[in-house]
């Protein structure tokens, strides 16, 4: 599948950034421009997200192959991969599948294990019950969502996916039906087999439970050349909550 991307910079070393569930390349624009001081930065929209095509298939195998196709089409040699959340597991899948094709790996707040998806399934169910044709203003949709989703930050993140279609009606950029039907696939961790020796930095938010102390053993077992860094005061969206600290951690690791 041909993925949509935004590209910043013209440096020799390529850096591919892969967003999380319900995210898209737009979420990384500010950091992408900063990283472009040192790298040619590729902000990817995964299938069923952003401006990339929608498809019924949604699992780590096909997402990994999408990234490989992108790398091949753009003649990218030994990129650095940075993946957040869902994107982190896509990056891990790529690393175990195409080990020789990666220079370094940065995993933002995601461990190589299964995660319960009930919360995300509930979000999708709530969103699917909102008939966008009944609304003419974005804030009206925010009010409708607020009855079920109390956290303003979550609603704001989701609402970034709104756009107007050719009929000037609101629509979601992510593939709502496809994600609803295939969401369980993102629990998969069966591809974490053997040992990956690519230099890897796991960066976790100090207030997040996505990478716990219990995960450290599995990380060190399967990633023989890794470090685990904590950004205190940050949650799961560590790159948005502490962008300067996150930027410095990534640059320090990637340039060393």
Image: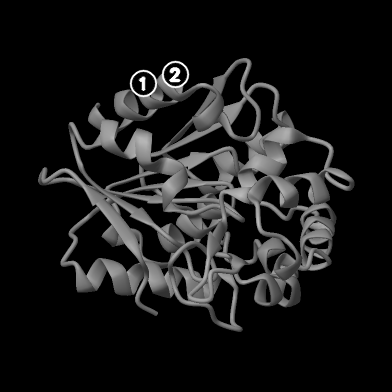
Q: Residue furthest bottom?
A: 56
Above-or-below relation of 20 to 217: below
Q: Quadrant of the N terminus?
A: bottom left
Would you call the spot at circle 2 few (<14 residues within 10 Å), some (14-19), or many (20 or more)? Answer: some
Contact flag, marks 1 and 2 (Cβ < 8 Å): yes
Q: Position of residue 33 (x, y in %)?
A: 27, 36
Q: Position of residue 205 (x, y in %)?
A: 61, 27
Q: Is residue 12 above or below residue 179?
A: above
Compared with 199, 77 (above or below) is below
Quickly name the residue at label 2. 245
Helix, strand or loop status at disc 1: helix
Residue marked by disc 1: 248
Count of picture labels = 2
How are the residues colored?
one colour
Q: Is residue 10 left or right of residue 248?
A: left
Q: Which mark is residue 73?
A: none
Mark 1 Cα shell of 10 Å, populated few (<14), some (14-19), many (≥20) = few
Residue at the image position 51 percent from the left and 21 percent from the top: 242
- The image shows residue 56 at horizontal and vertical percentages of 61, 84
Looking at the rendering, in which quadrant would you find the C terminus? top left
Instruction: Identify the residue at the far front of this view.
Output: 136
Please name the residue shown 73% across and 34% down the image. Answer: 152
**Picture residue at 57% right of the left edge, 55% below the top:** 161
Tag 2, which secondary structure?
helix
Q: Quadrant of residue 32?
A: top left
Q: Residue furthest top?
A: 232
Q: Is residue 149 left or right of residue 133?
A: right
Between the residue at mark 1 and the residue at mark 2, the CA separation in whole angstroms equals 5 Å
- At 23% across and 72% down in the image, what residue appears? 72
Q: Is residue 207 left or right of residue 102?
A: right
């Amino acid at each position: 599948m041909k993925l949509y991307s935004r590209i910043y910079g013209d440096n020799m070393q390529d850096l591919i950034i892969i967003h999380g569930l319900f995210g898209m390349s737009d979420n990384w624009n500010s950091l992408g421009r900063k990283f472009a001081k040192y790298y040619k930065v590729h902000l990817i929209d995964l299938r069923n997200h952003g401006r990339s095509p929608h498809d019924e298939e949604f699992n780590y195998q096909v997402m990994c192959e999408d990234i490989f196709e992108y790398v091949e089409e753009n003649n990218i040699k030994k990129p650095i991969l940075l993946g957040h959340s869902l994107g982190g597991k896509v990056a891990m899948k790529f690393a175990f599948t195409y080990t020789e094709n990666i220079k370094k790996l940065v995993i933002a707040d995601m461990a190589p294990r299964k995660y319960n998806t009930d919360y995300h399934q509930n979000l999708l169910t709530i969103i699917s019950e909102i008939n966008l044709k009944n609304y003419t203003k974005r804030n009206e949709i925010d009010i409708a969502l607020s009855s079920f989703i109390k956290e303003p930050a979550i609603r704001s993140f989701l609402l970034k996916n709104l756009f107007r279609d050719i009929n000037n009606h609101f629509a979601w950029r992510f593939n709502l039906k496809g994600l609803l039907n295939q969401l369980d696939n993102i629990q998969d961790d069966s591809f974490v087999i053997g040992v990956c020796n690519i230099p890897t930095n796991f960066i976790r938010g100090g207030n997040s439970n996505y990478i716990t102390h219990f995960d450290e053993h599995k990380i060190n077992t399967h990633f023989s050349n890794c470090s685990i860094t904590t950004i205190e005061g940050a949650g799961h969206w560590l790159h948005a909550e502490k962008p300067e600290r996150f930027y410095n951690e990534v640059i320090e690791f990637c340039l060393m």
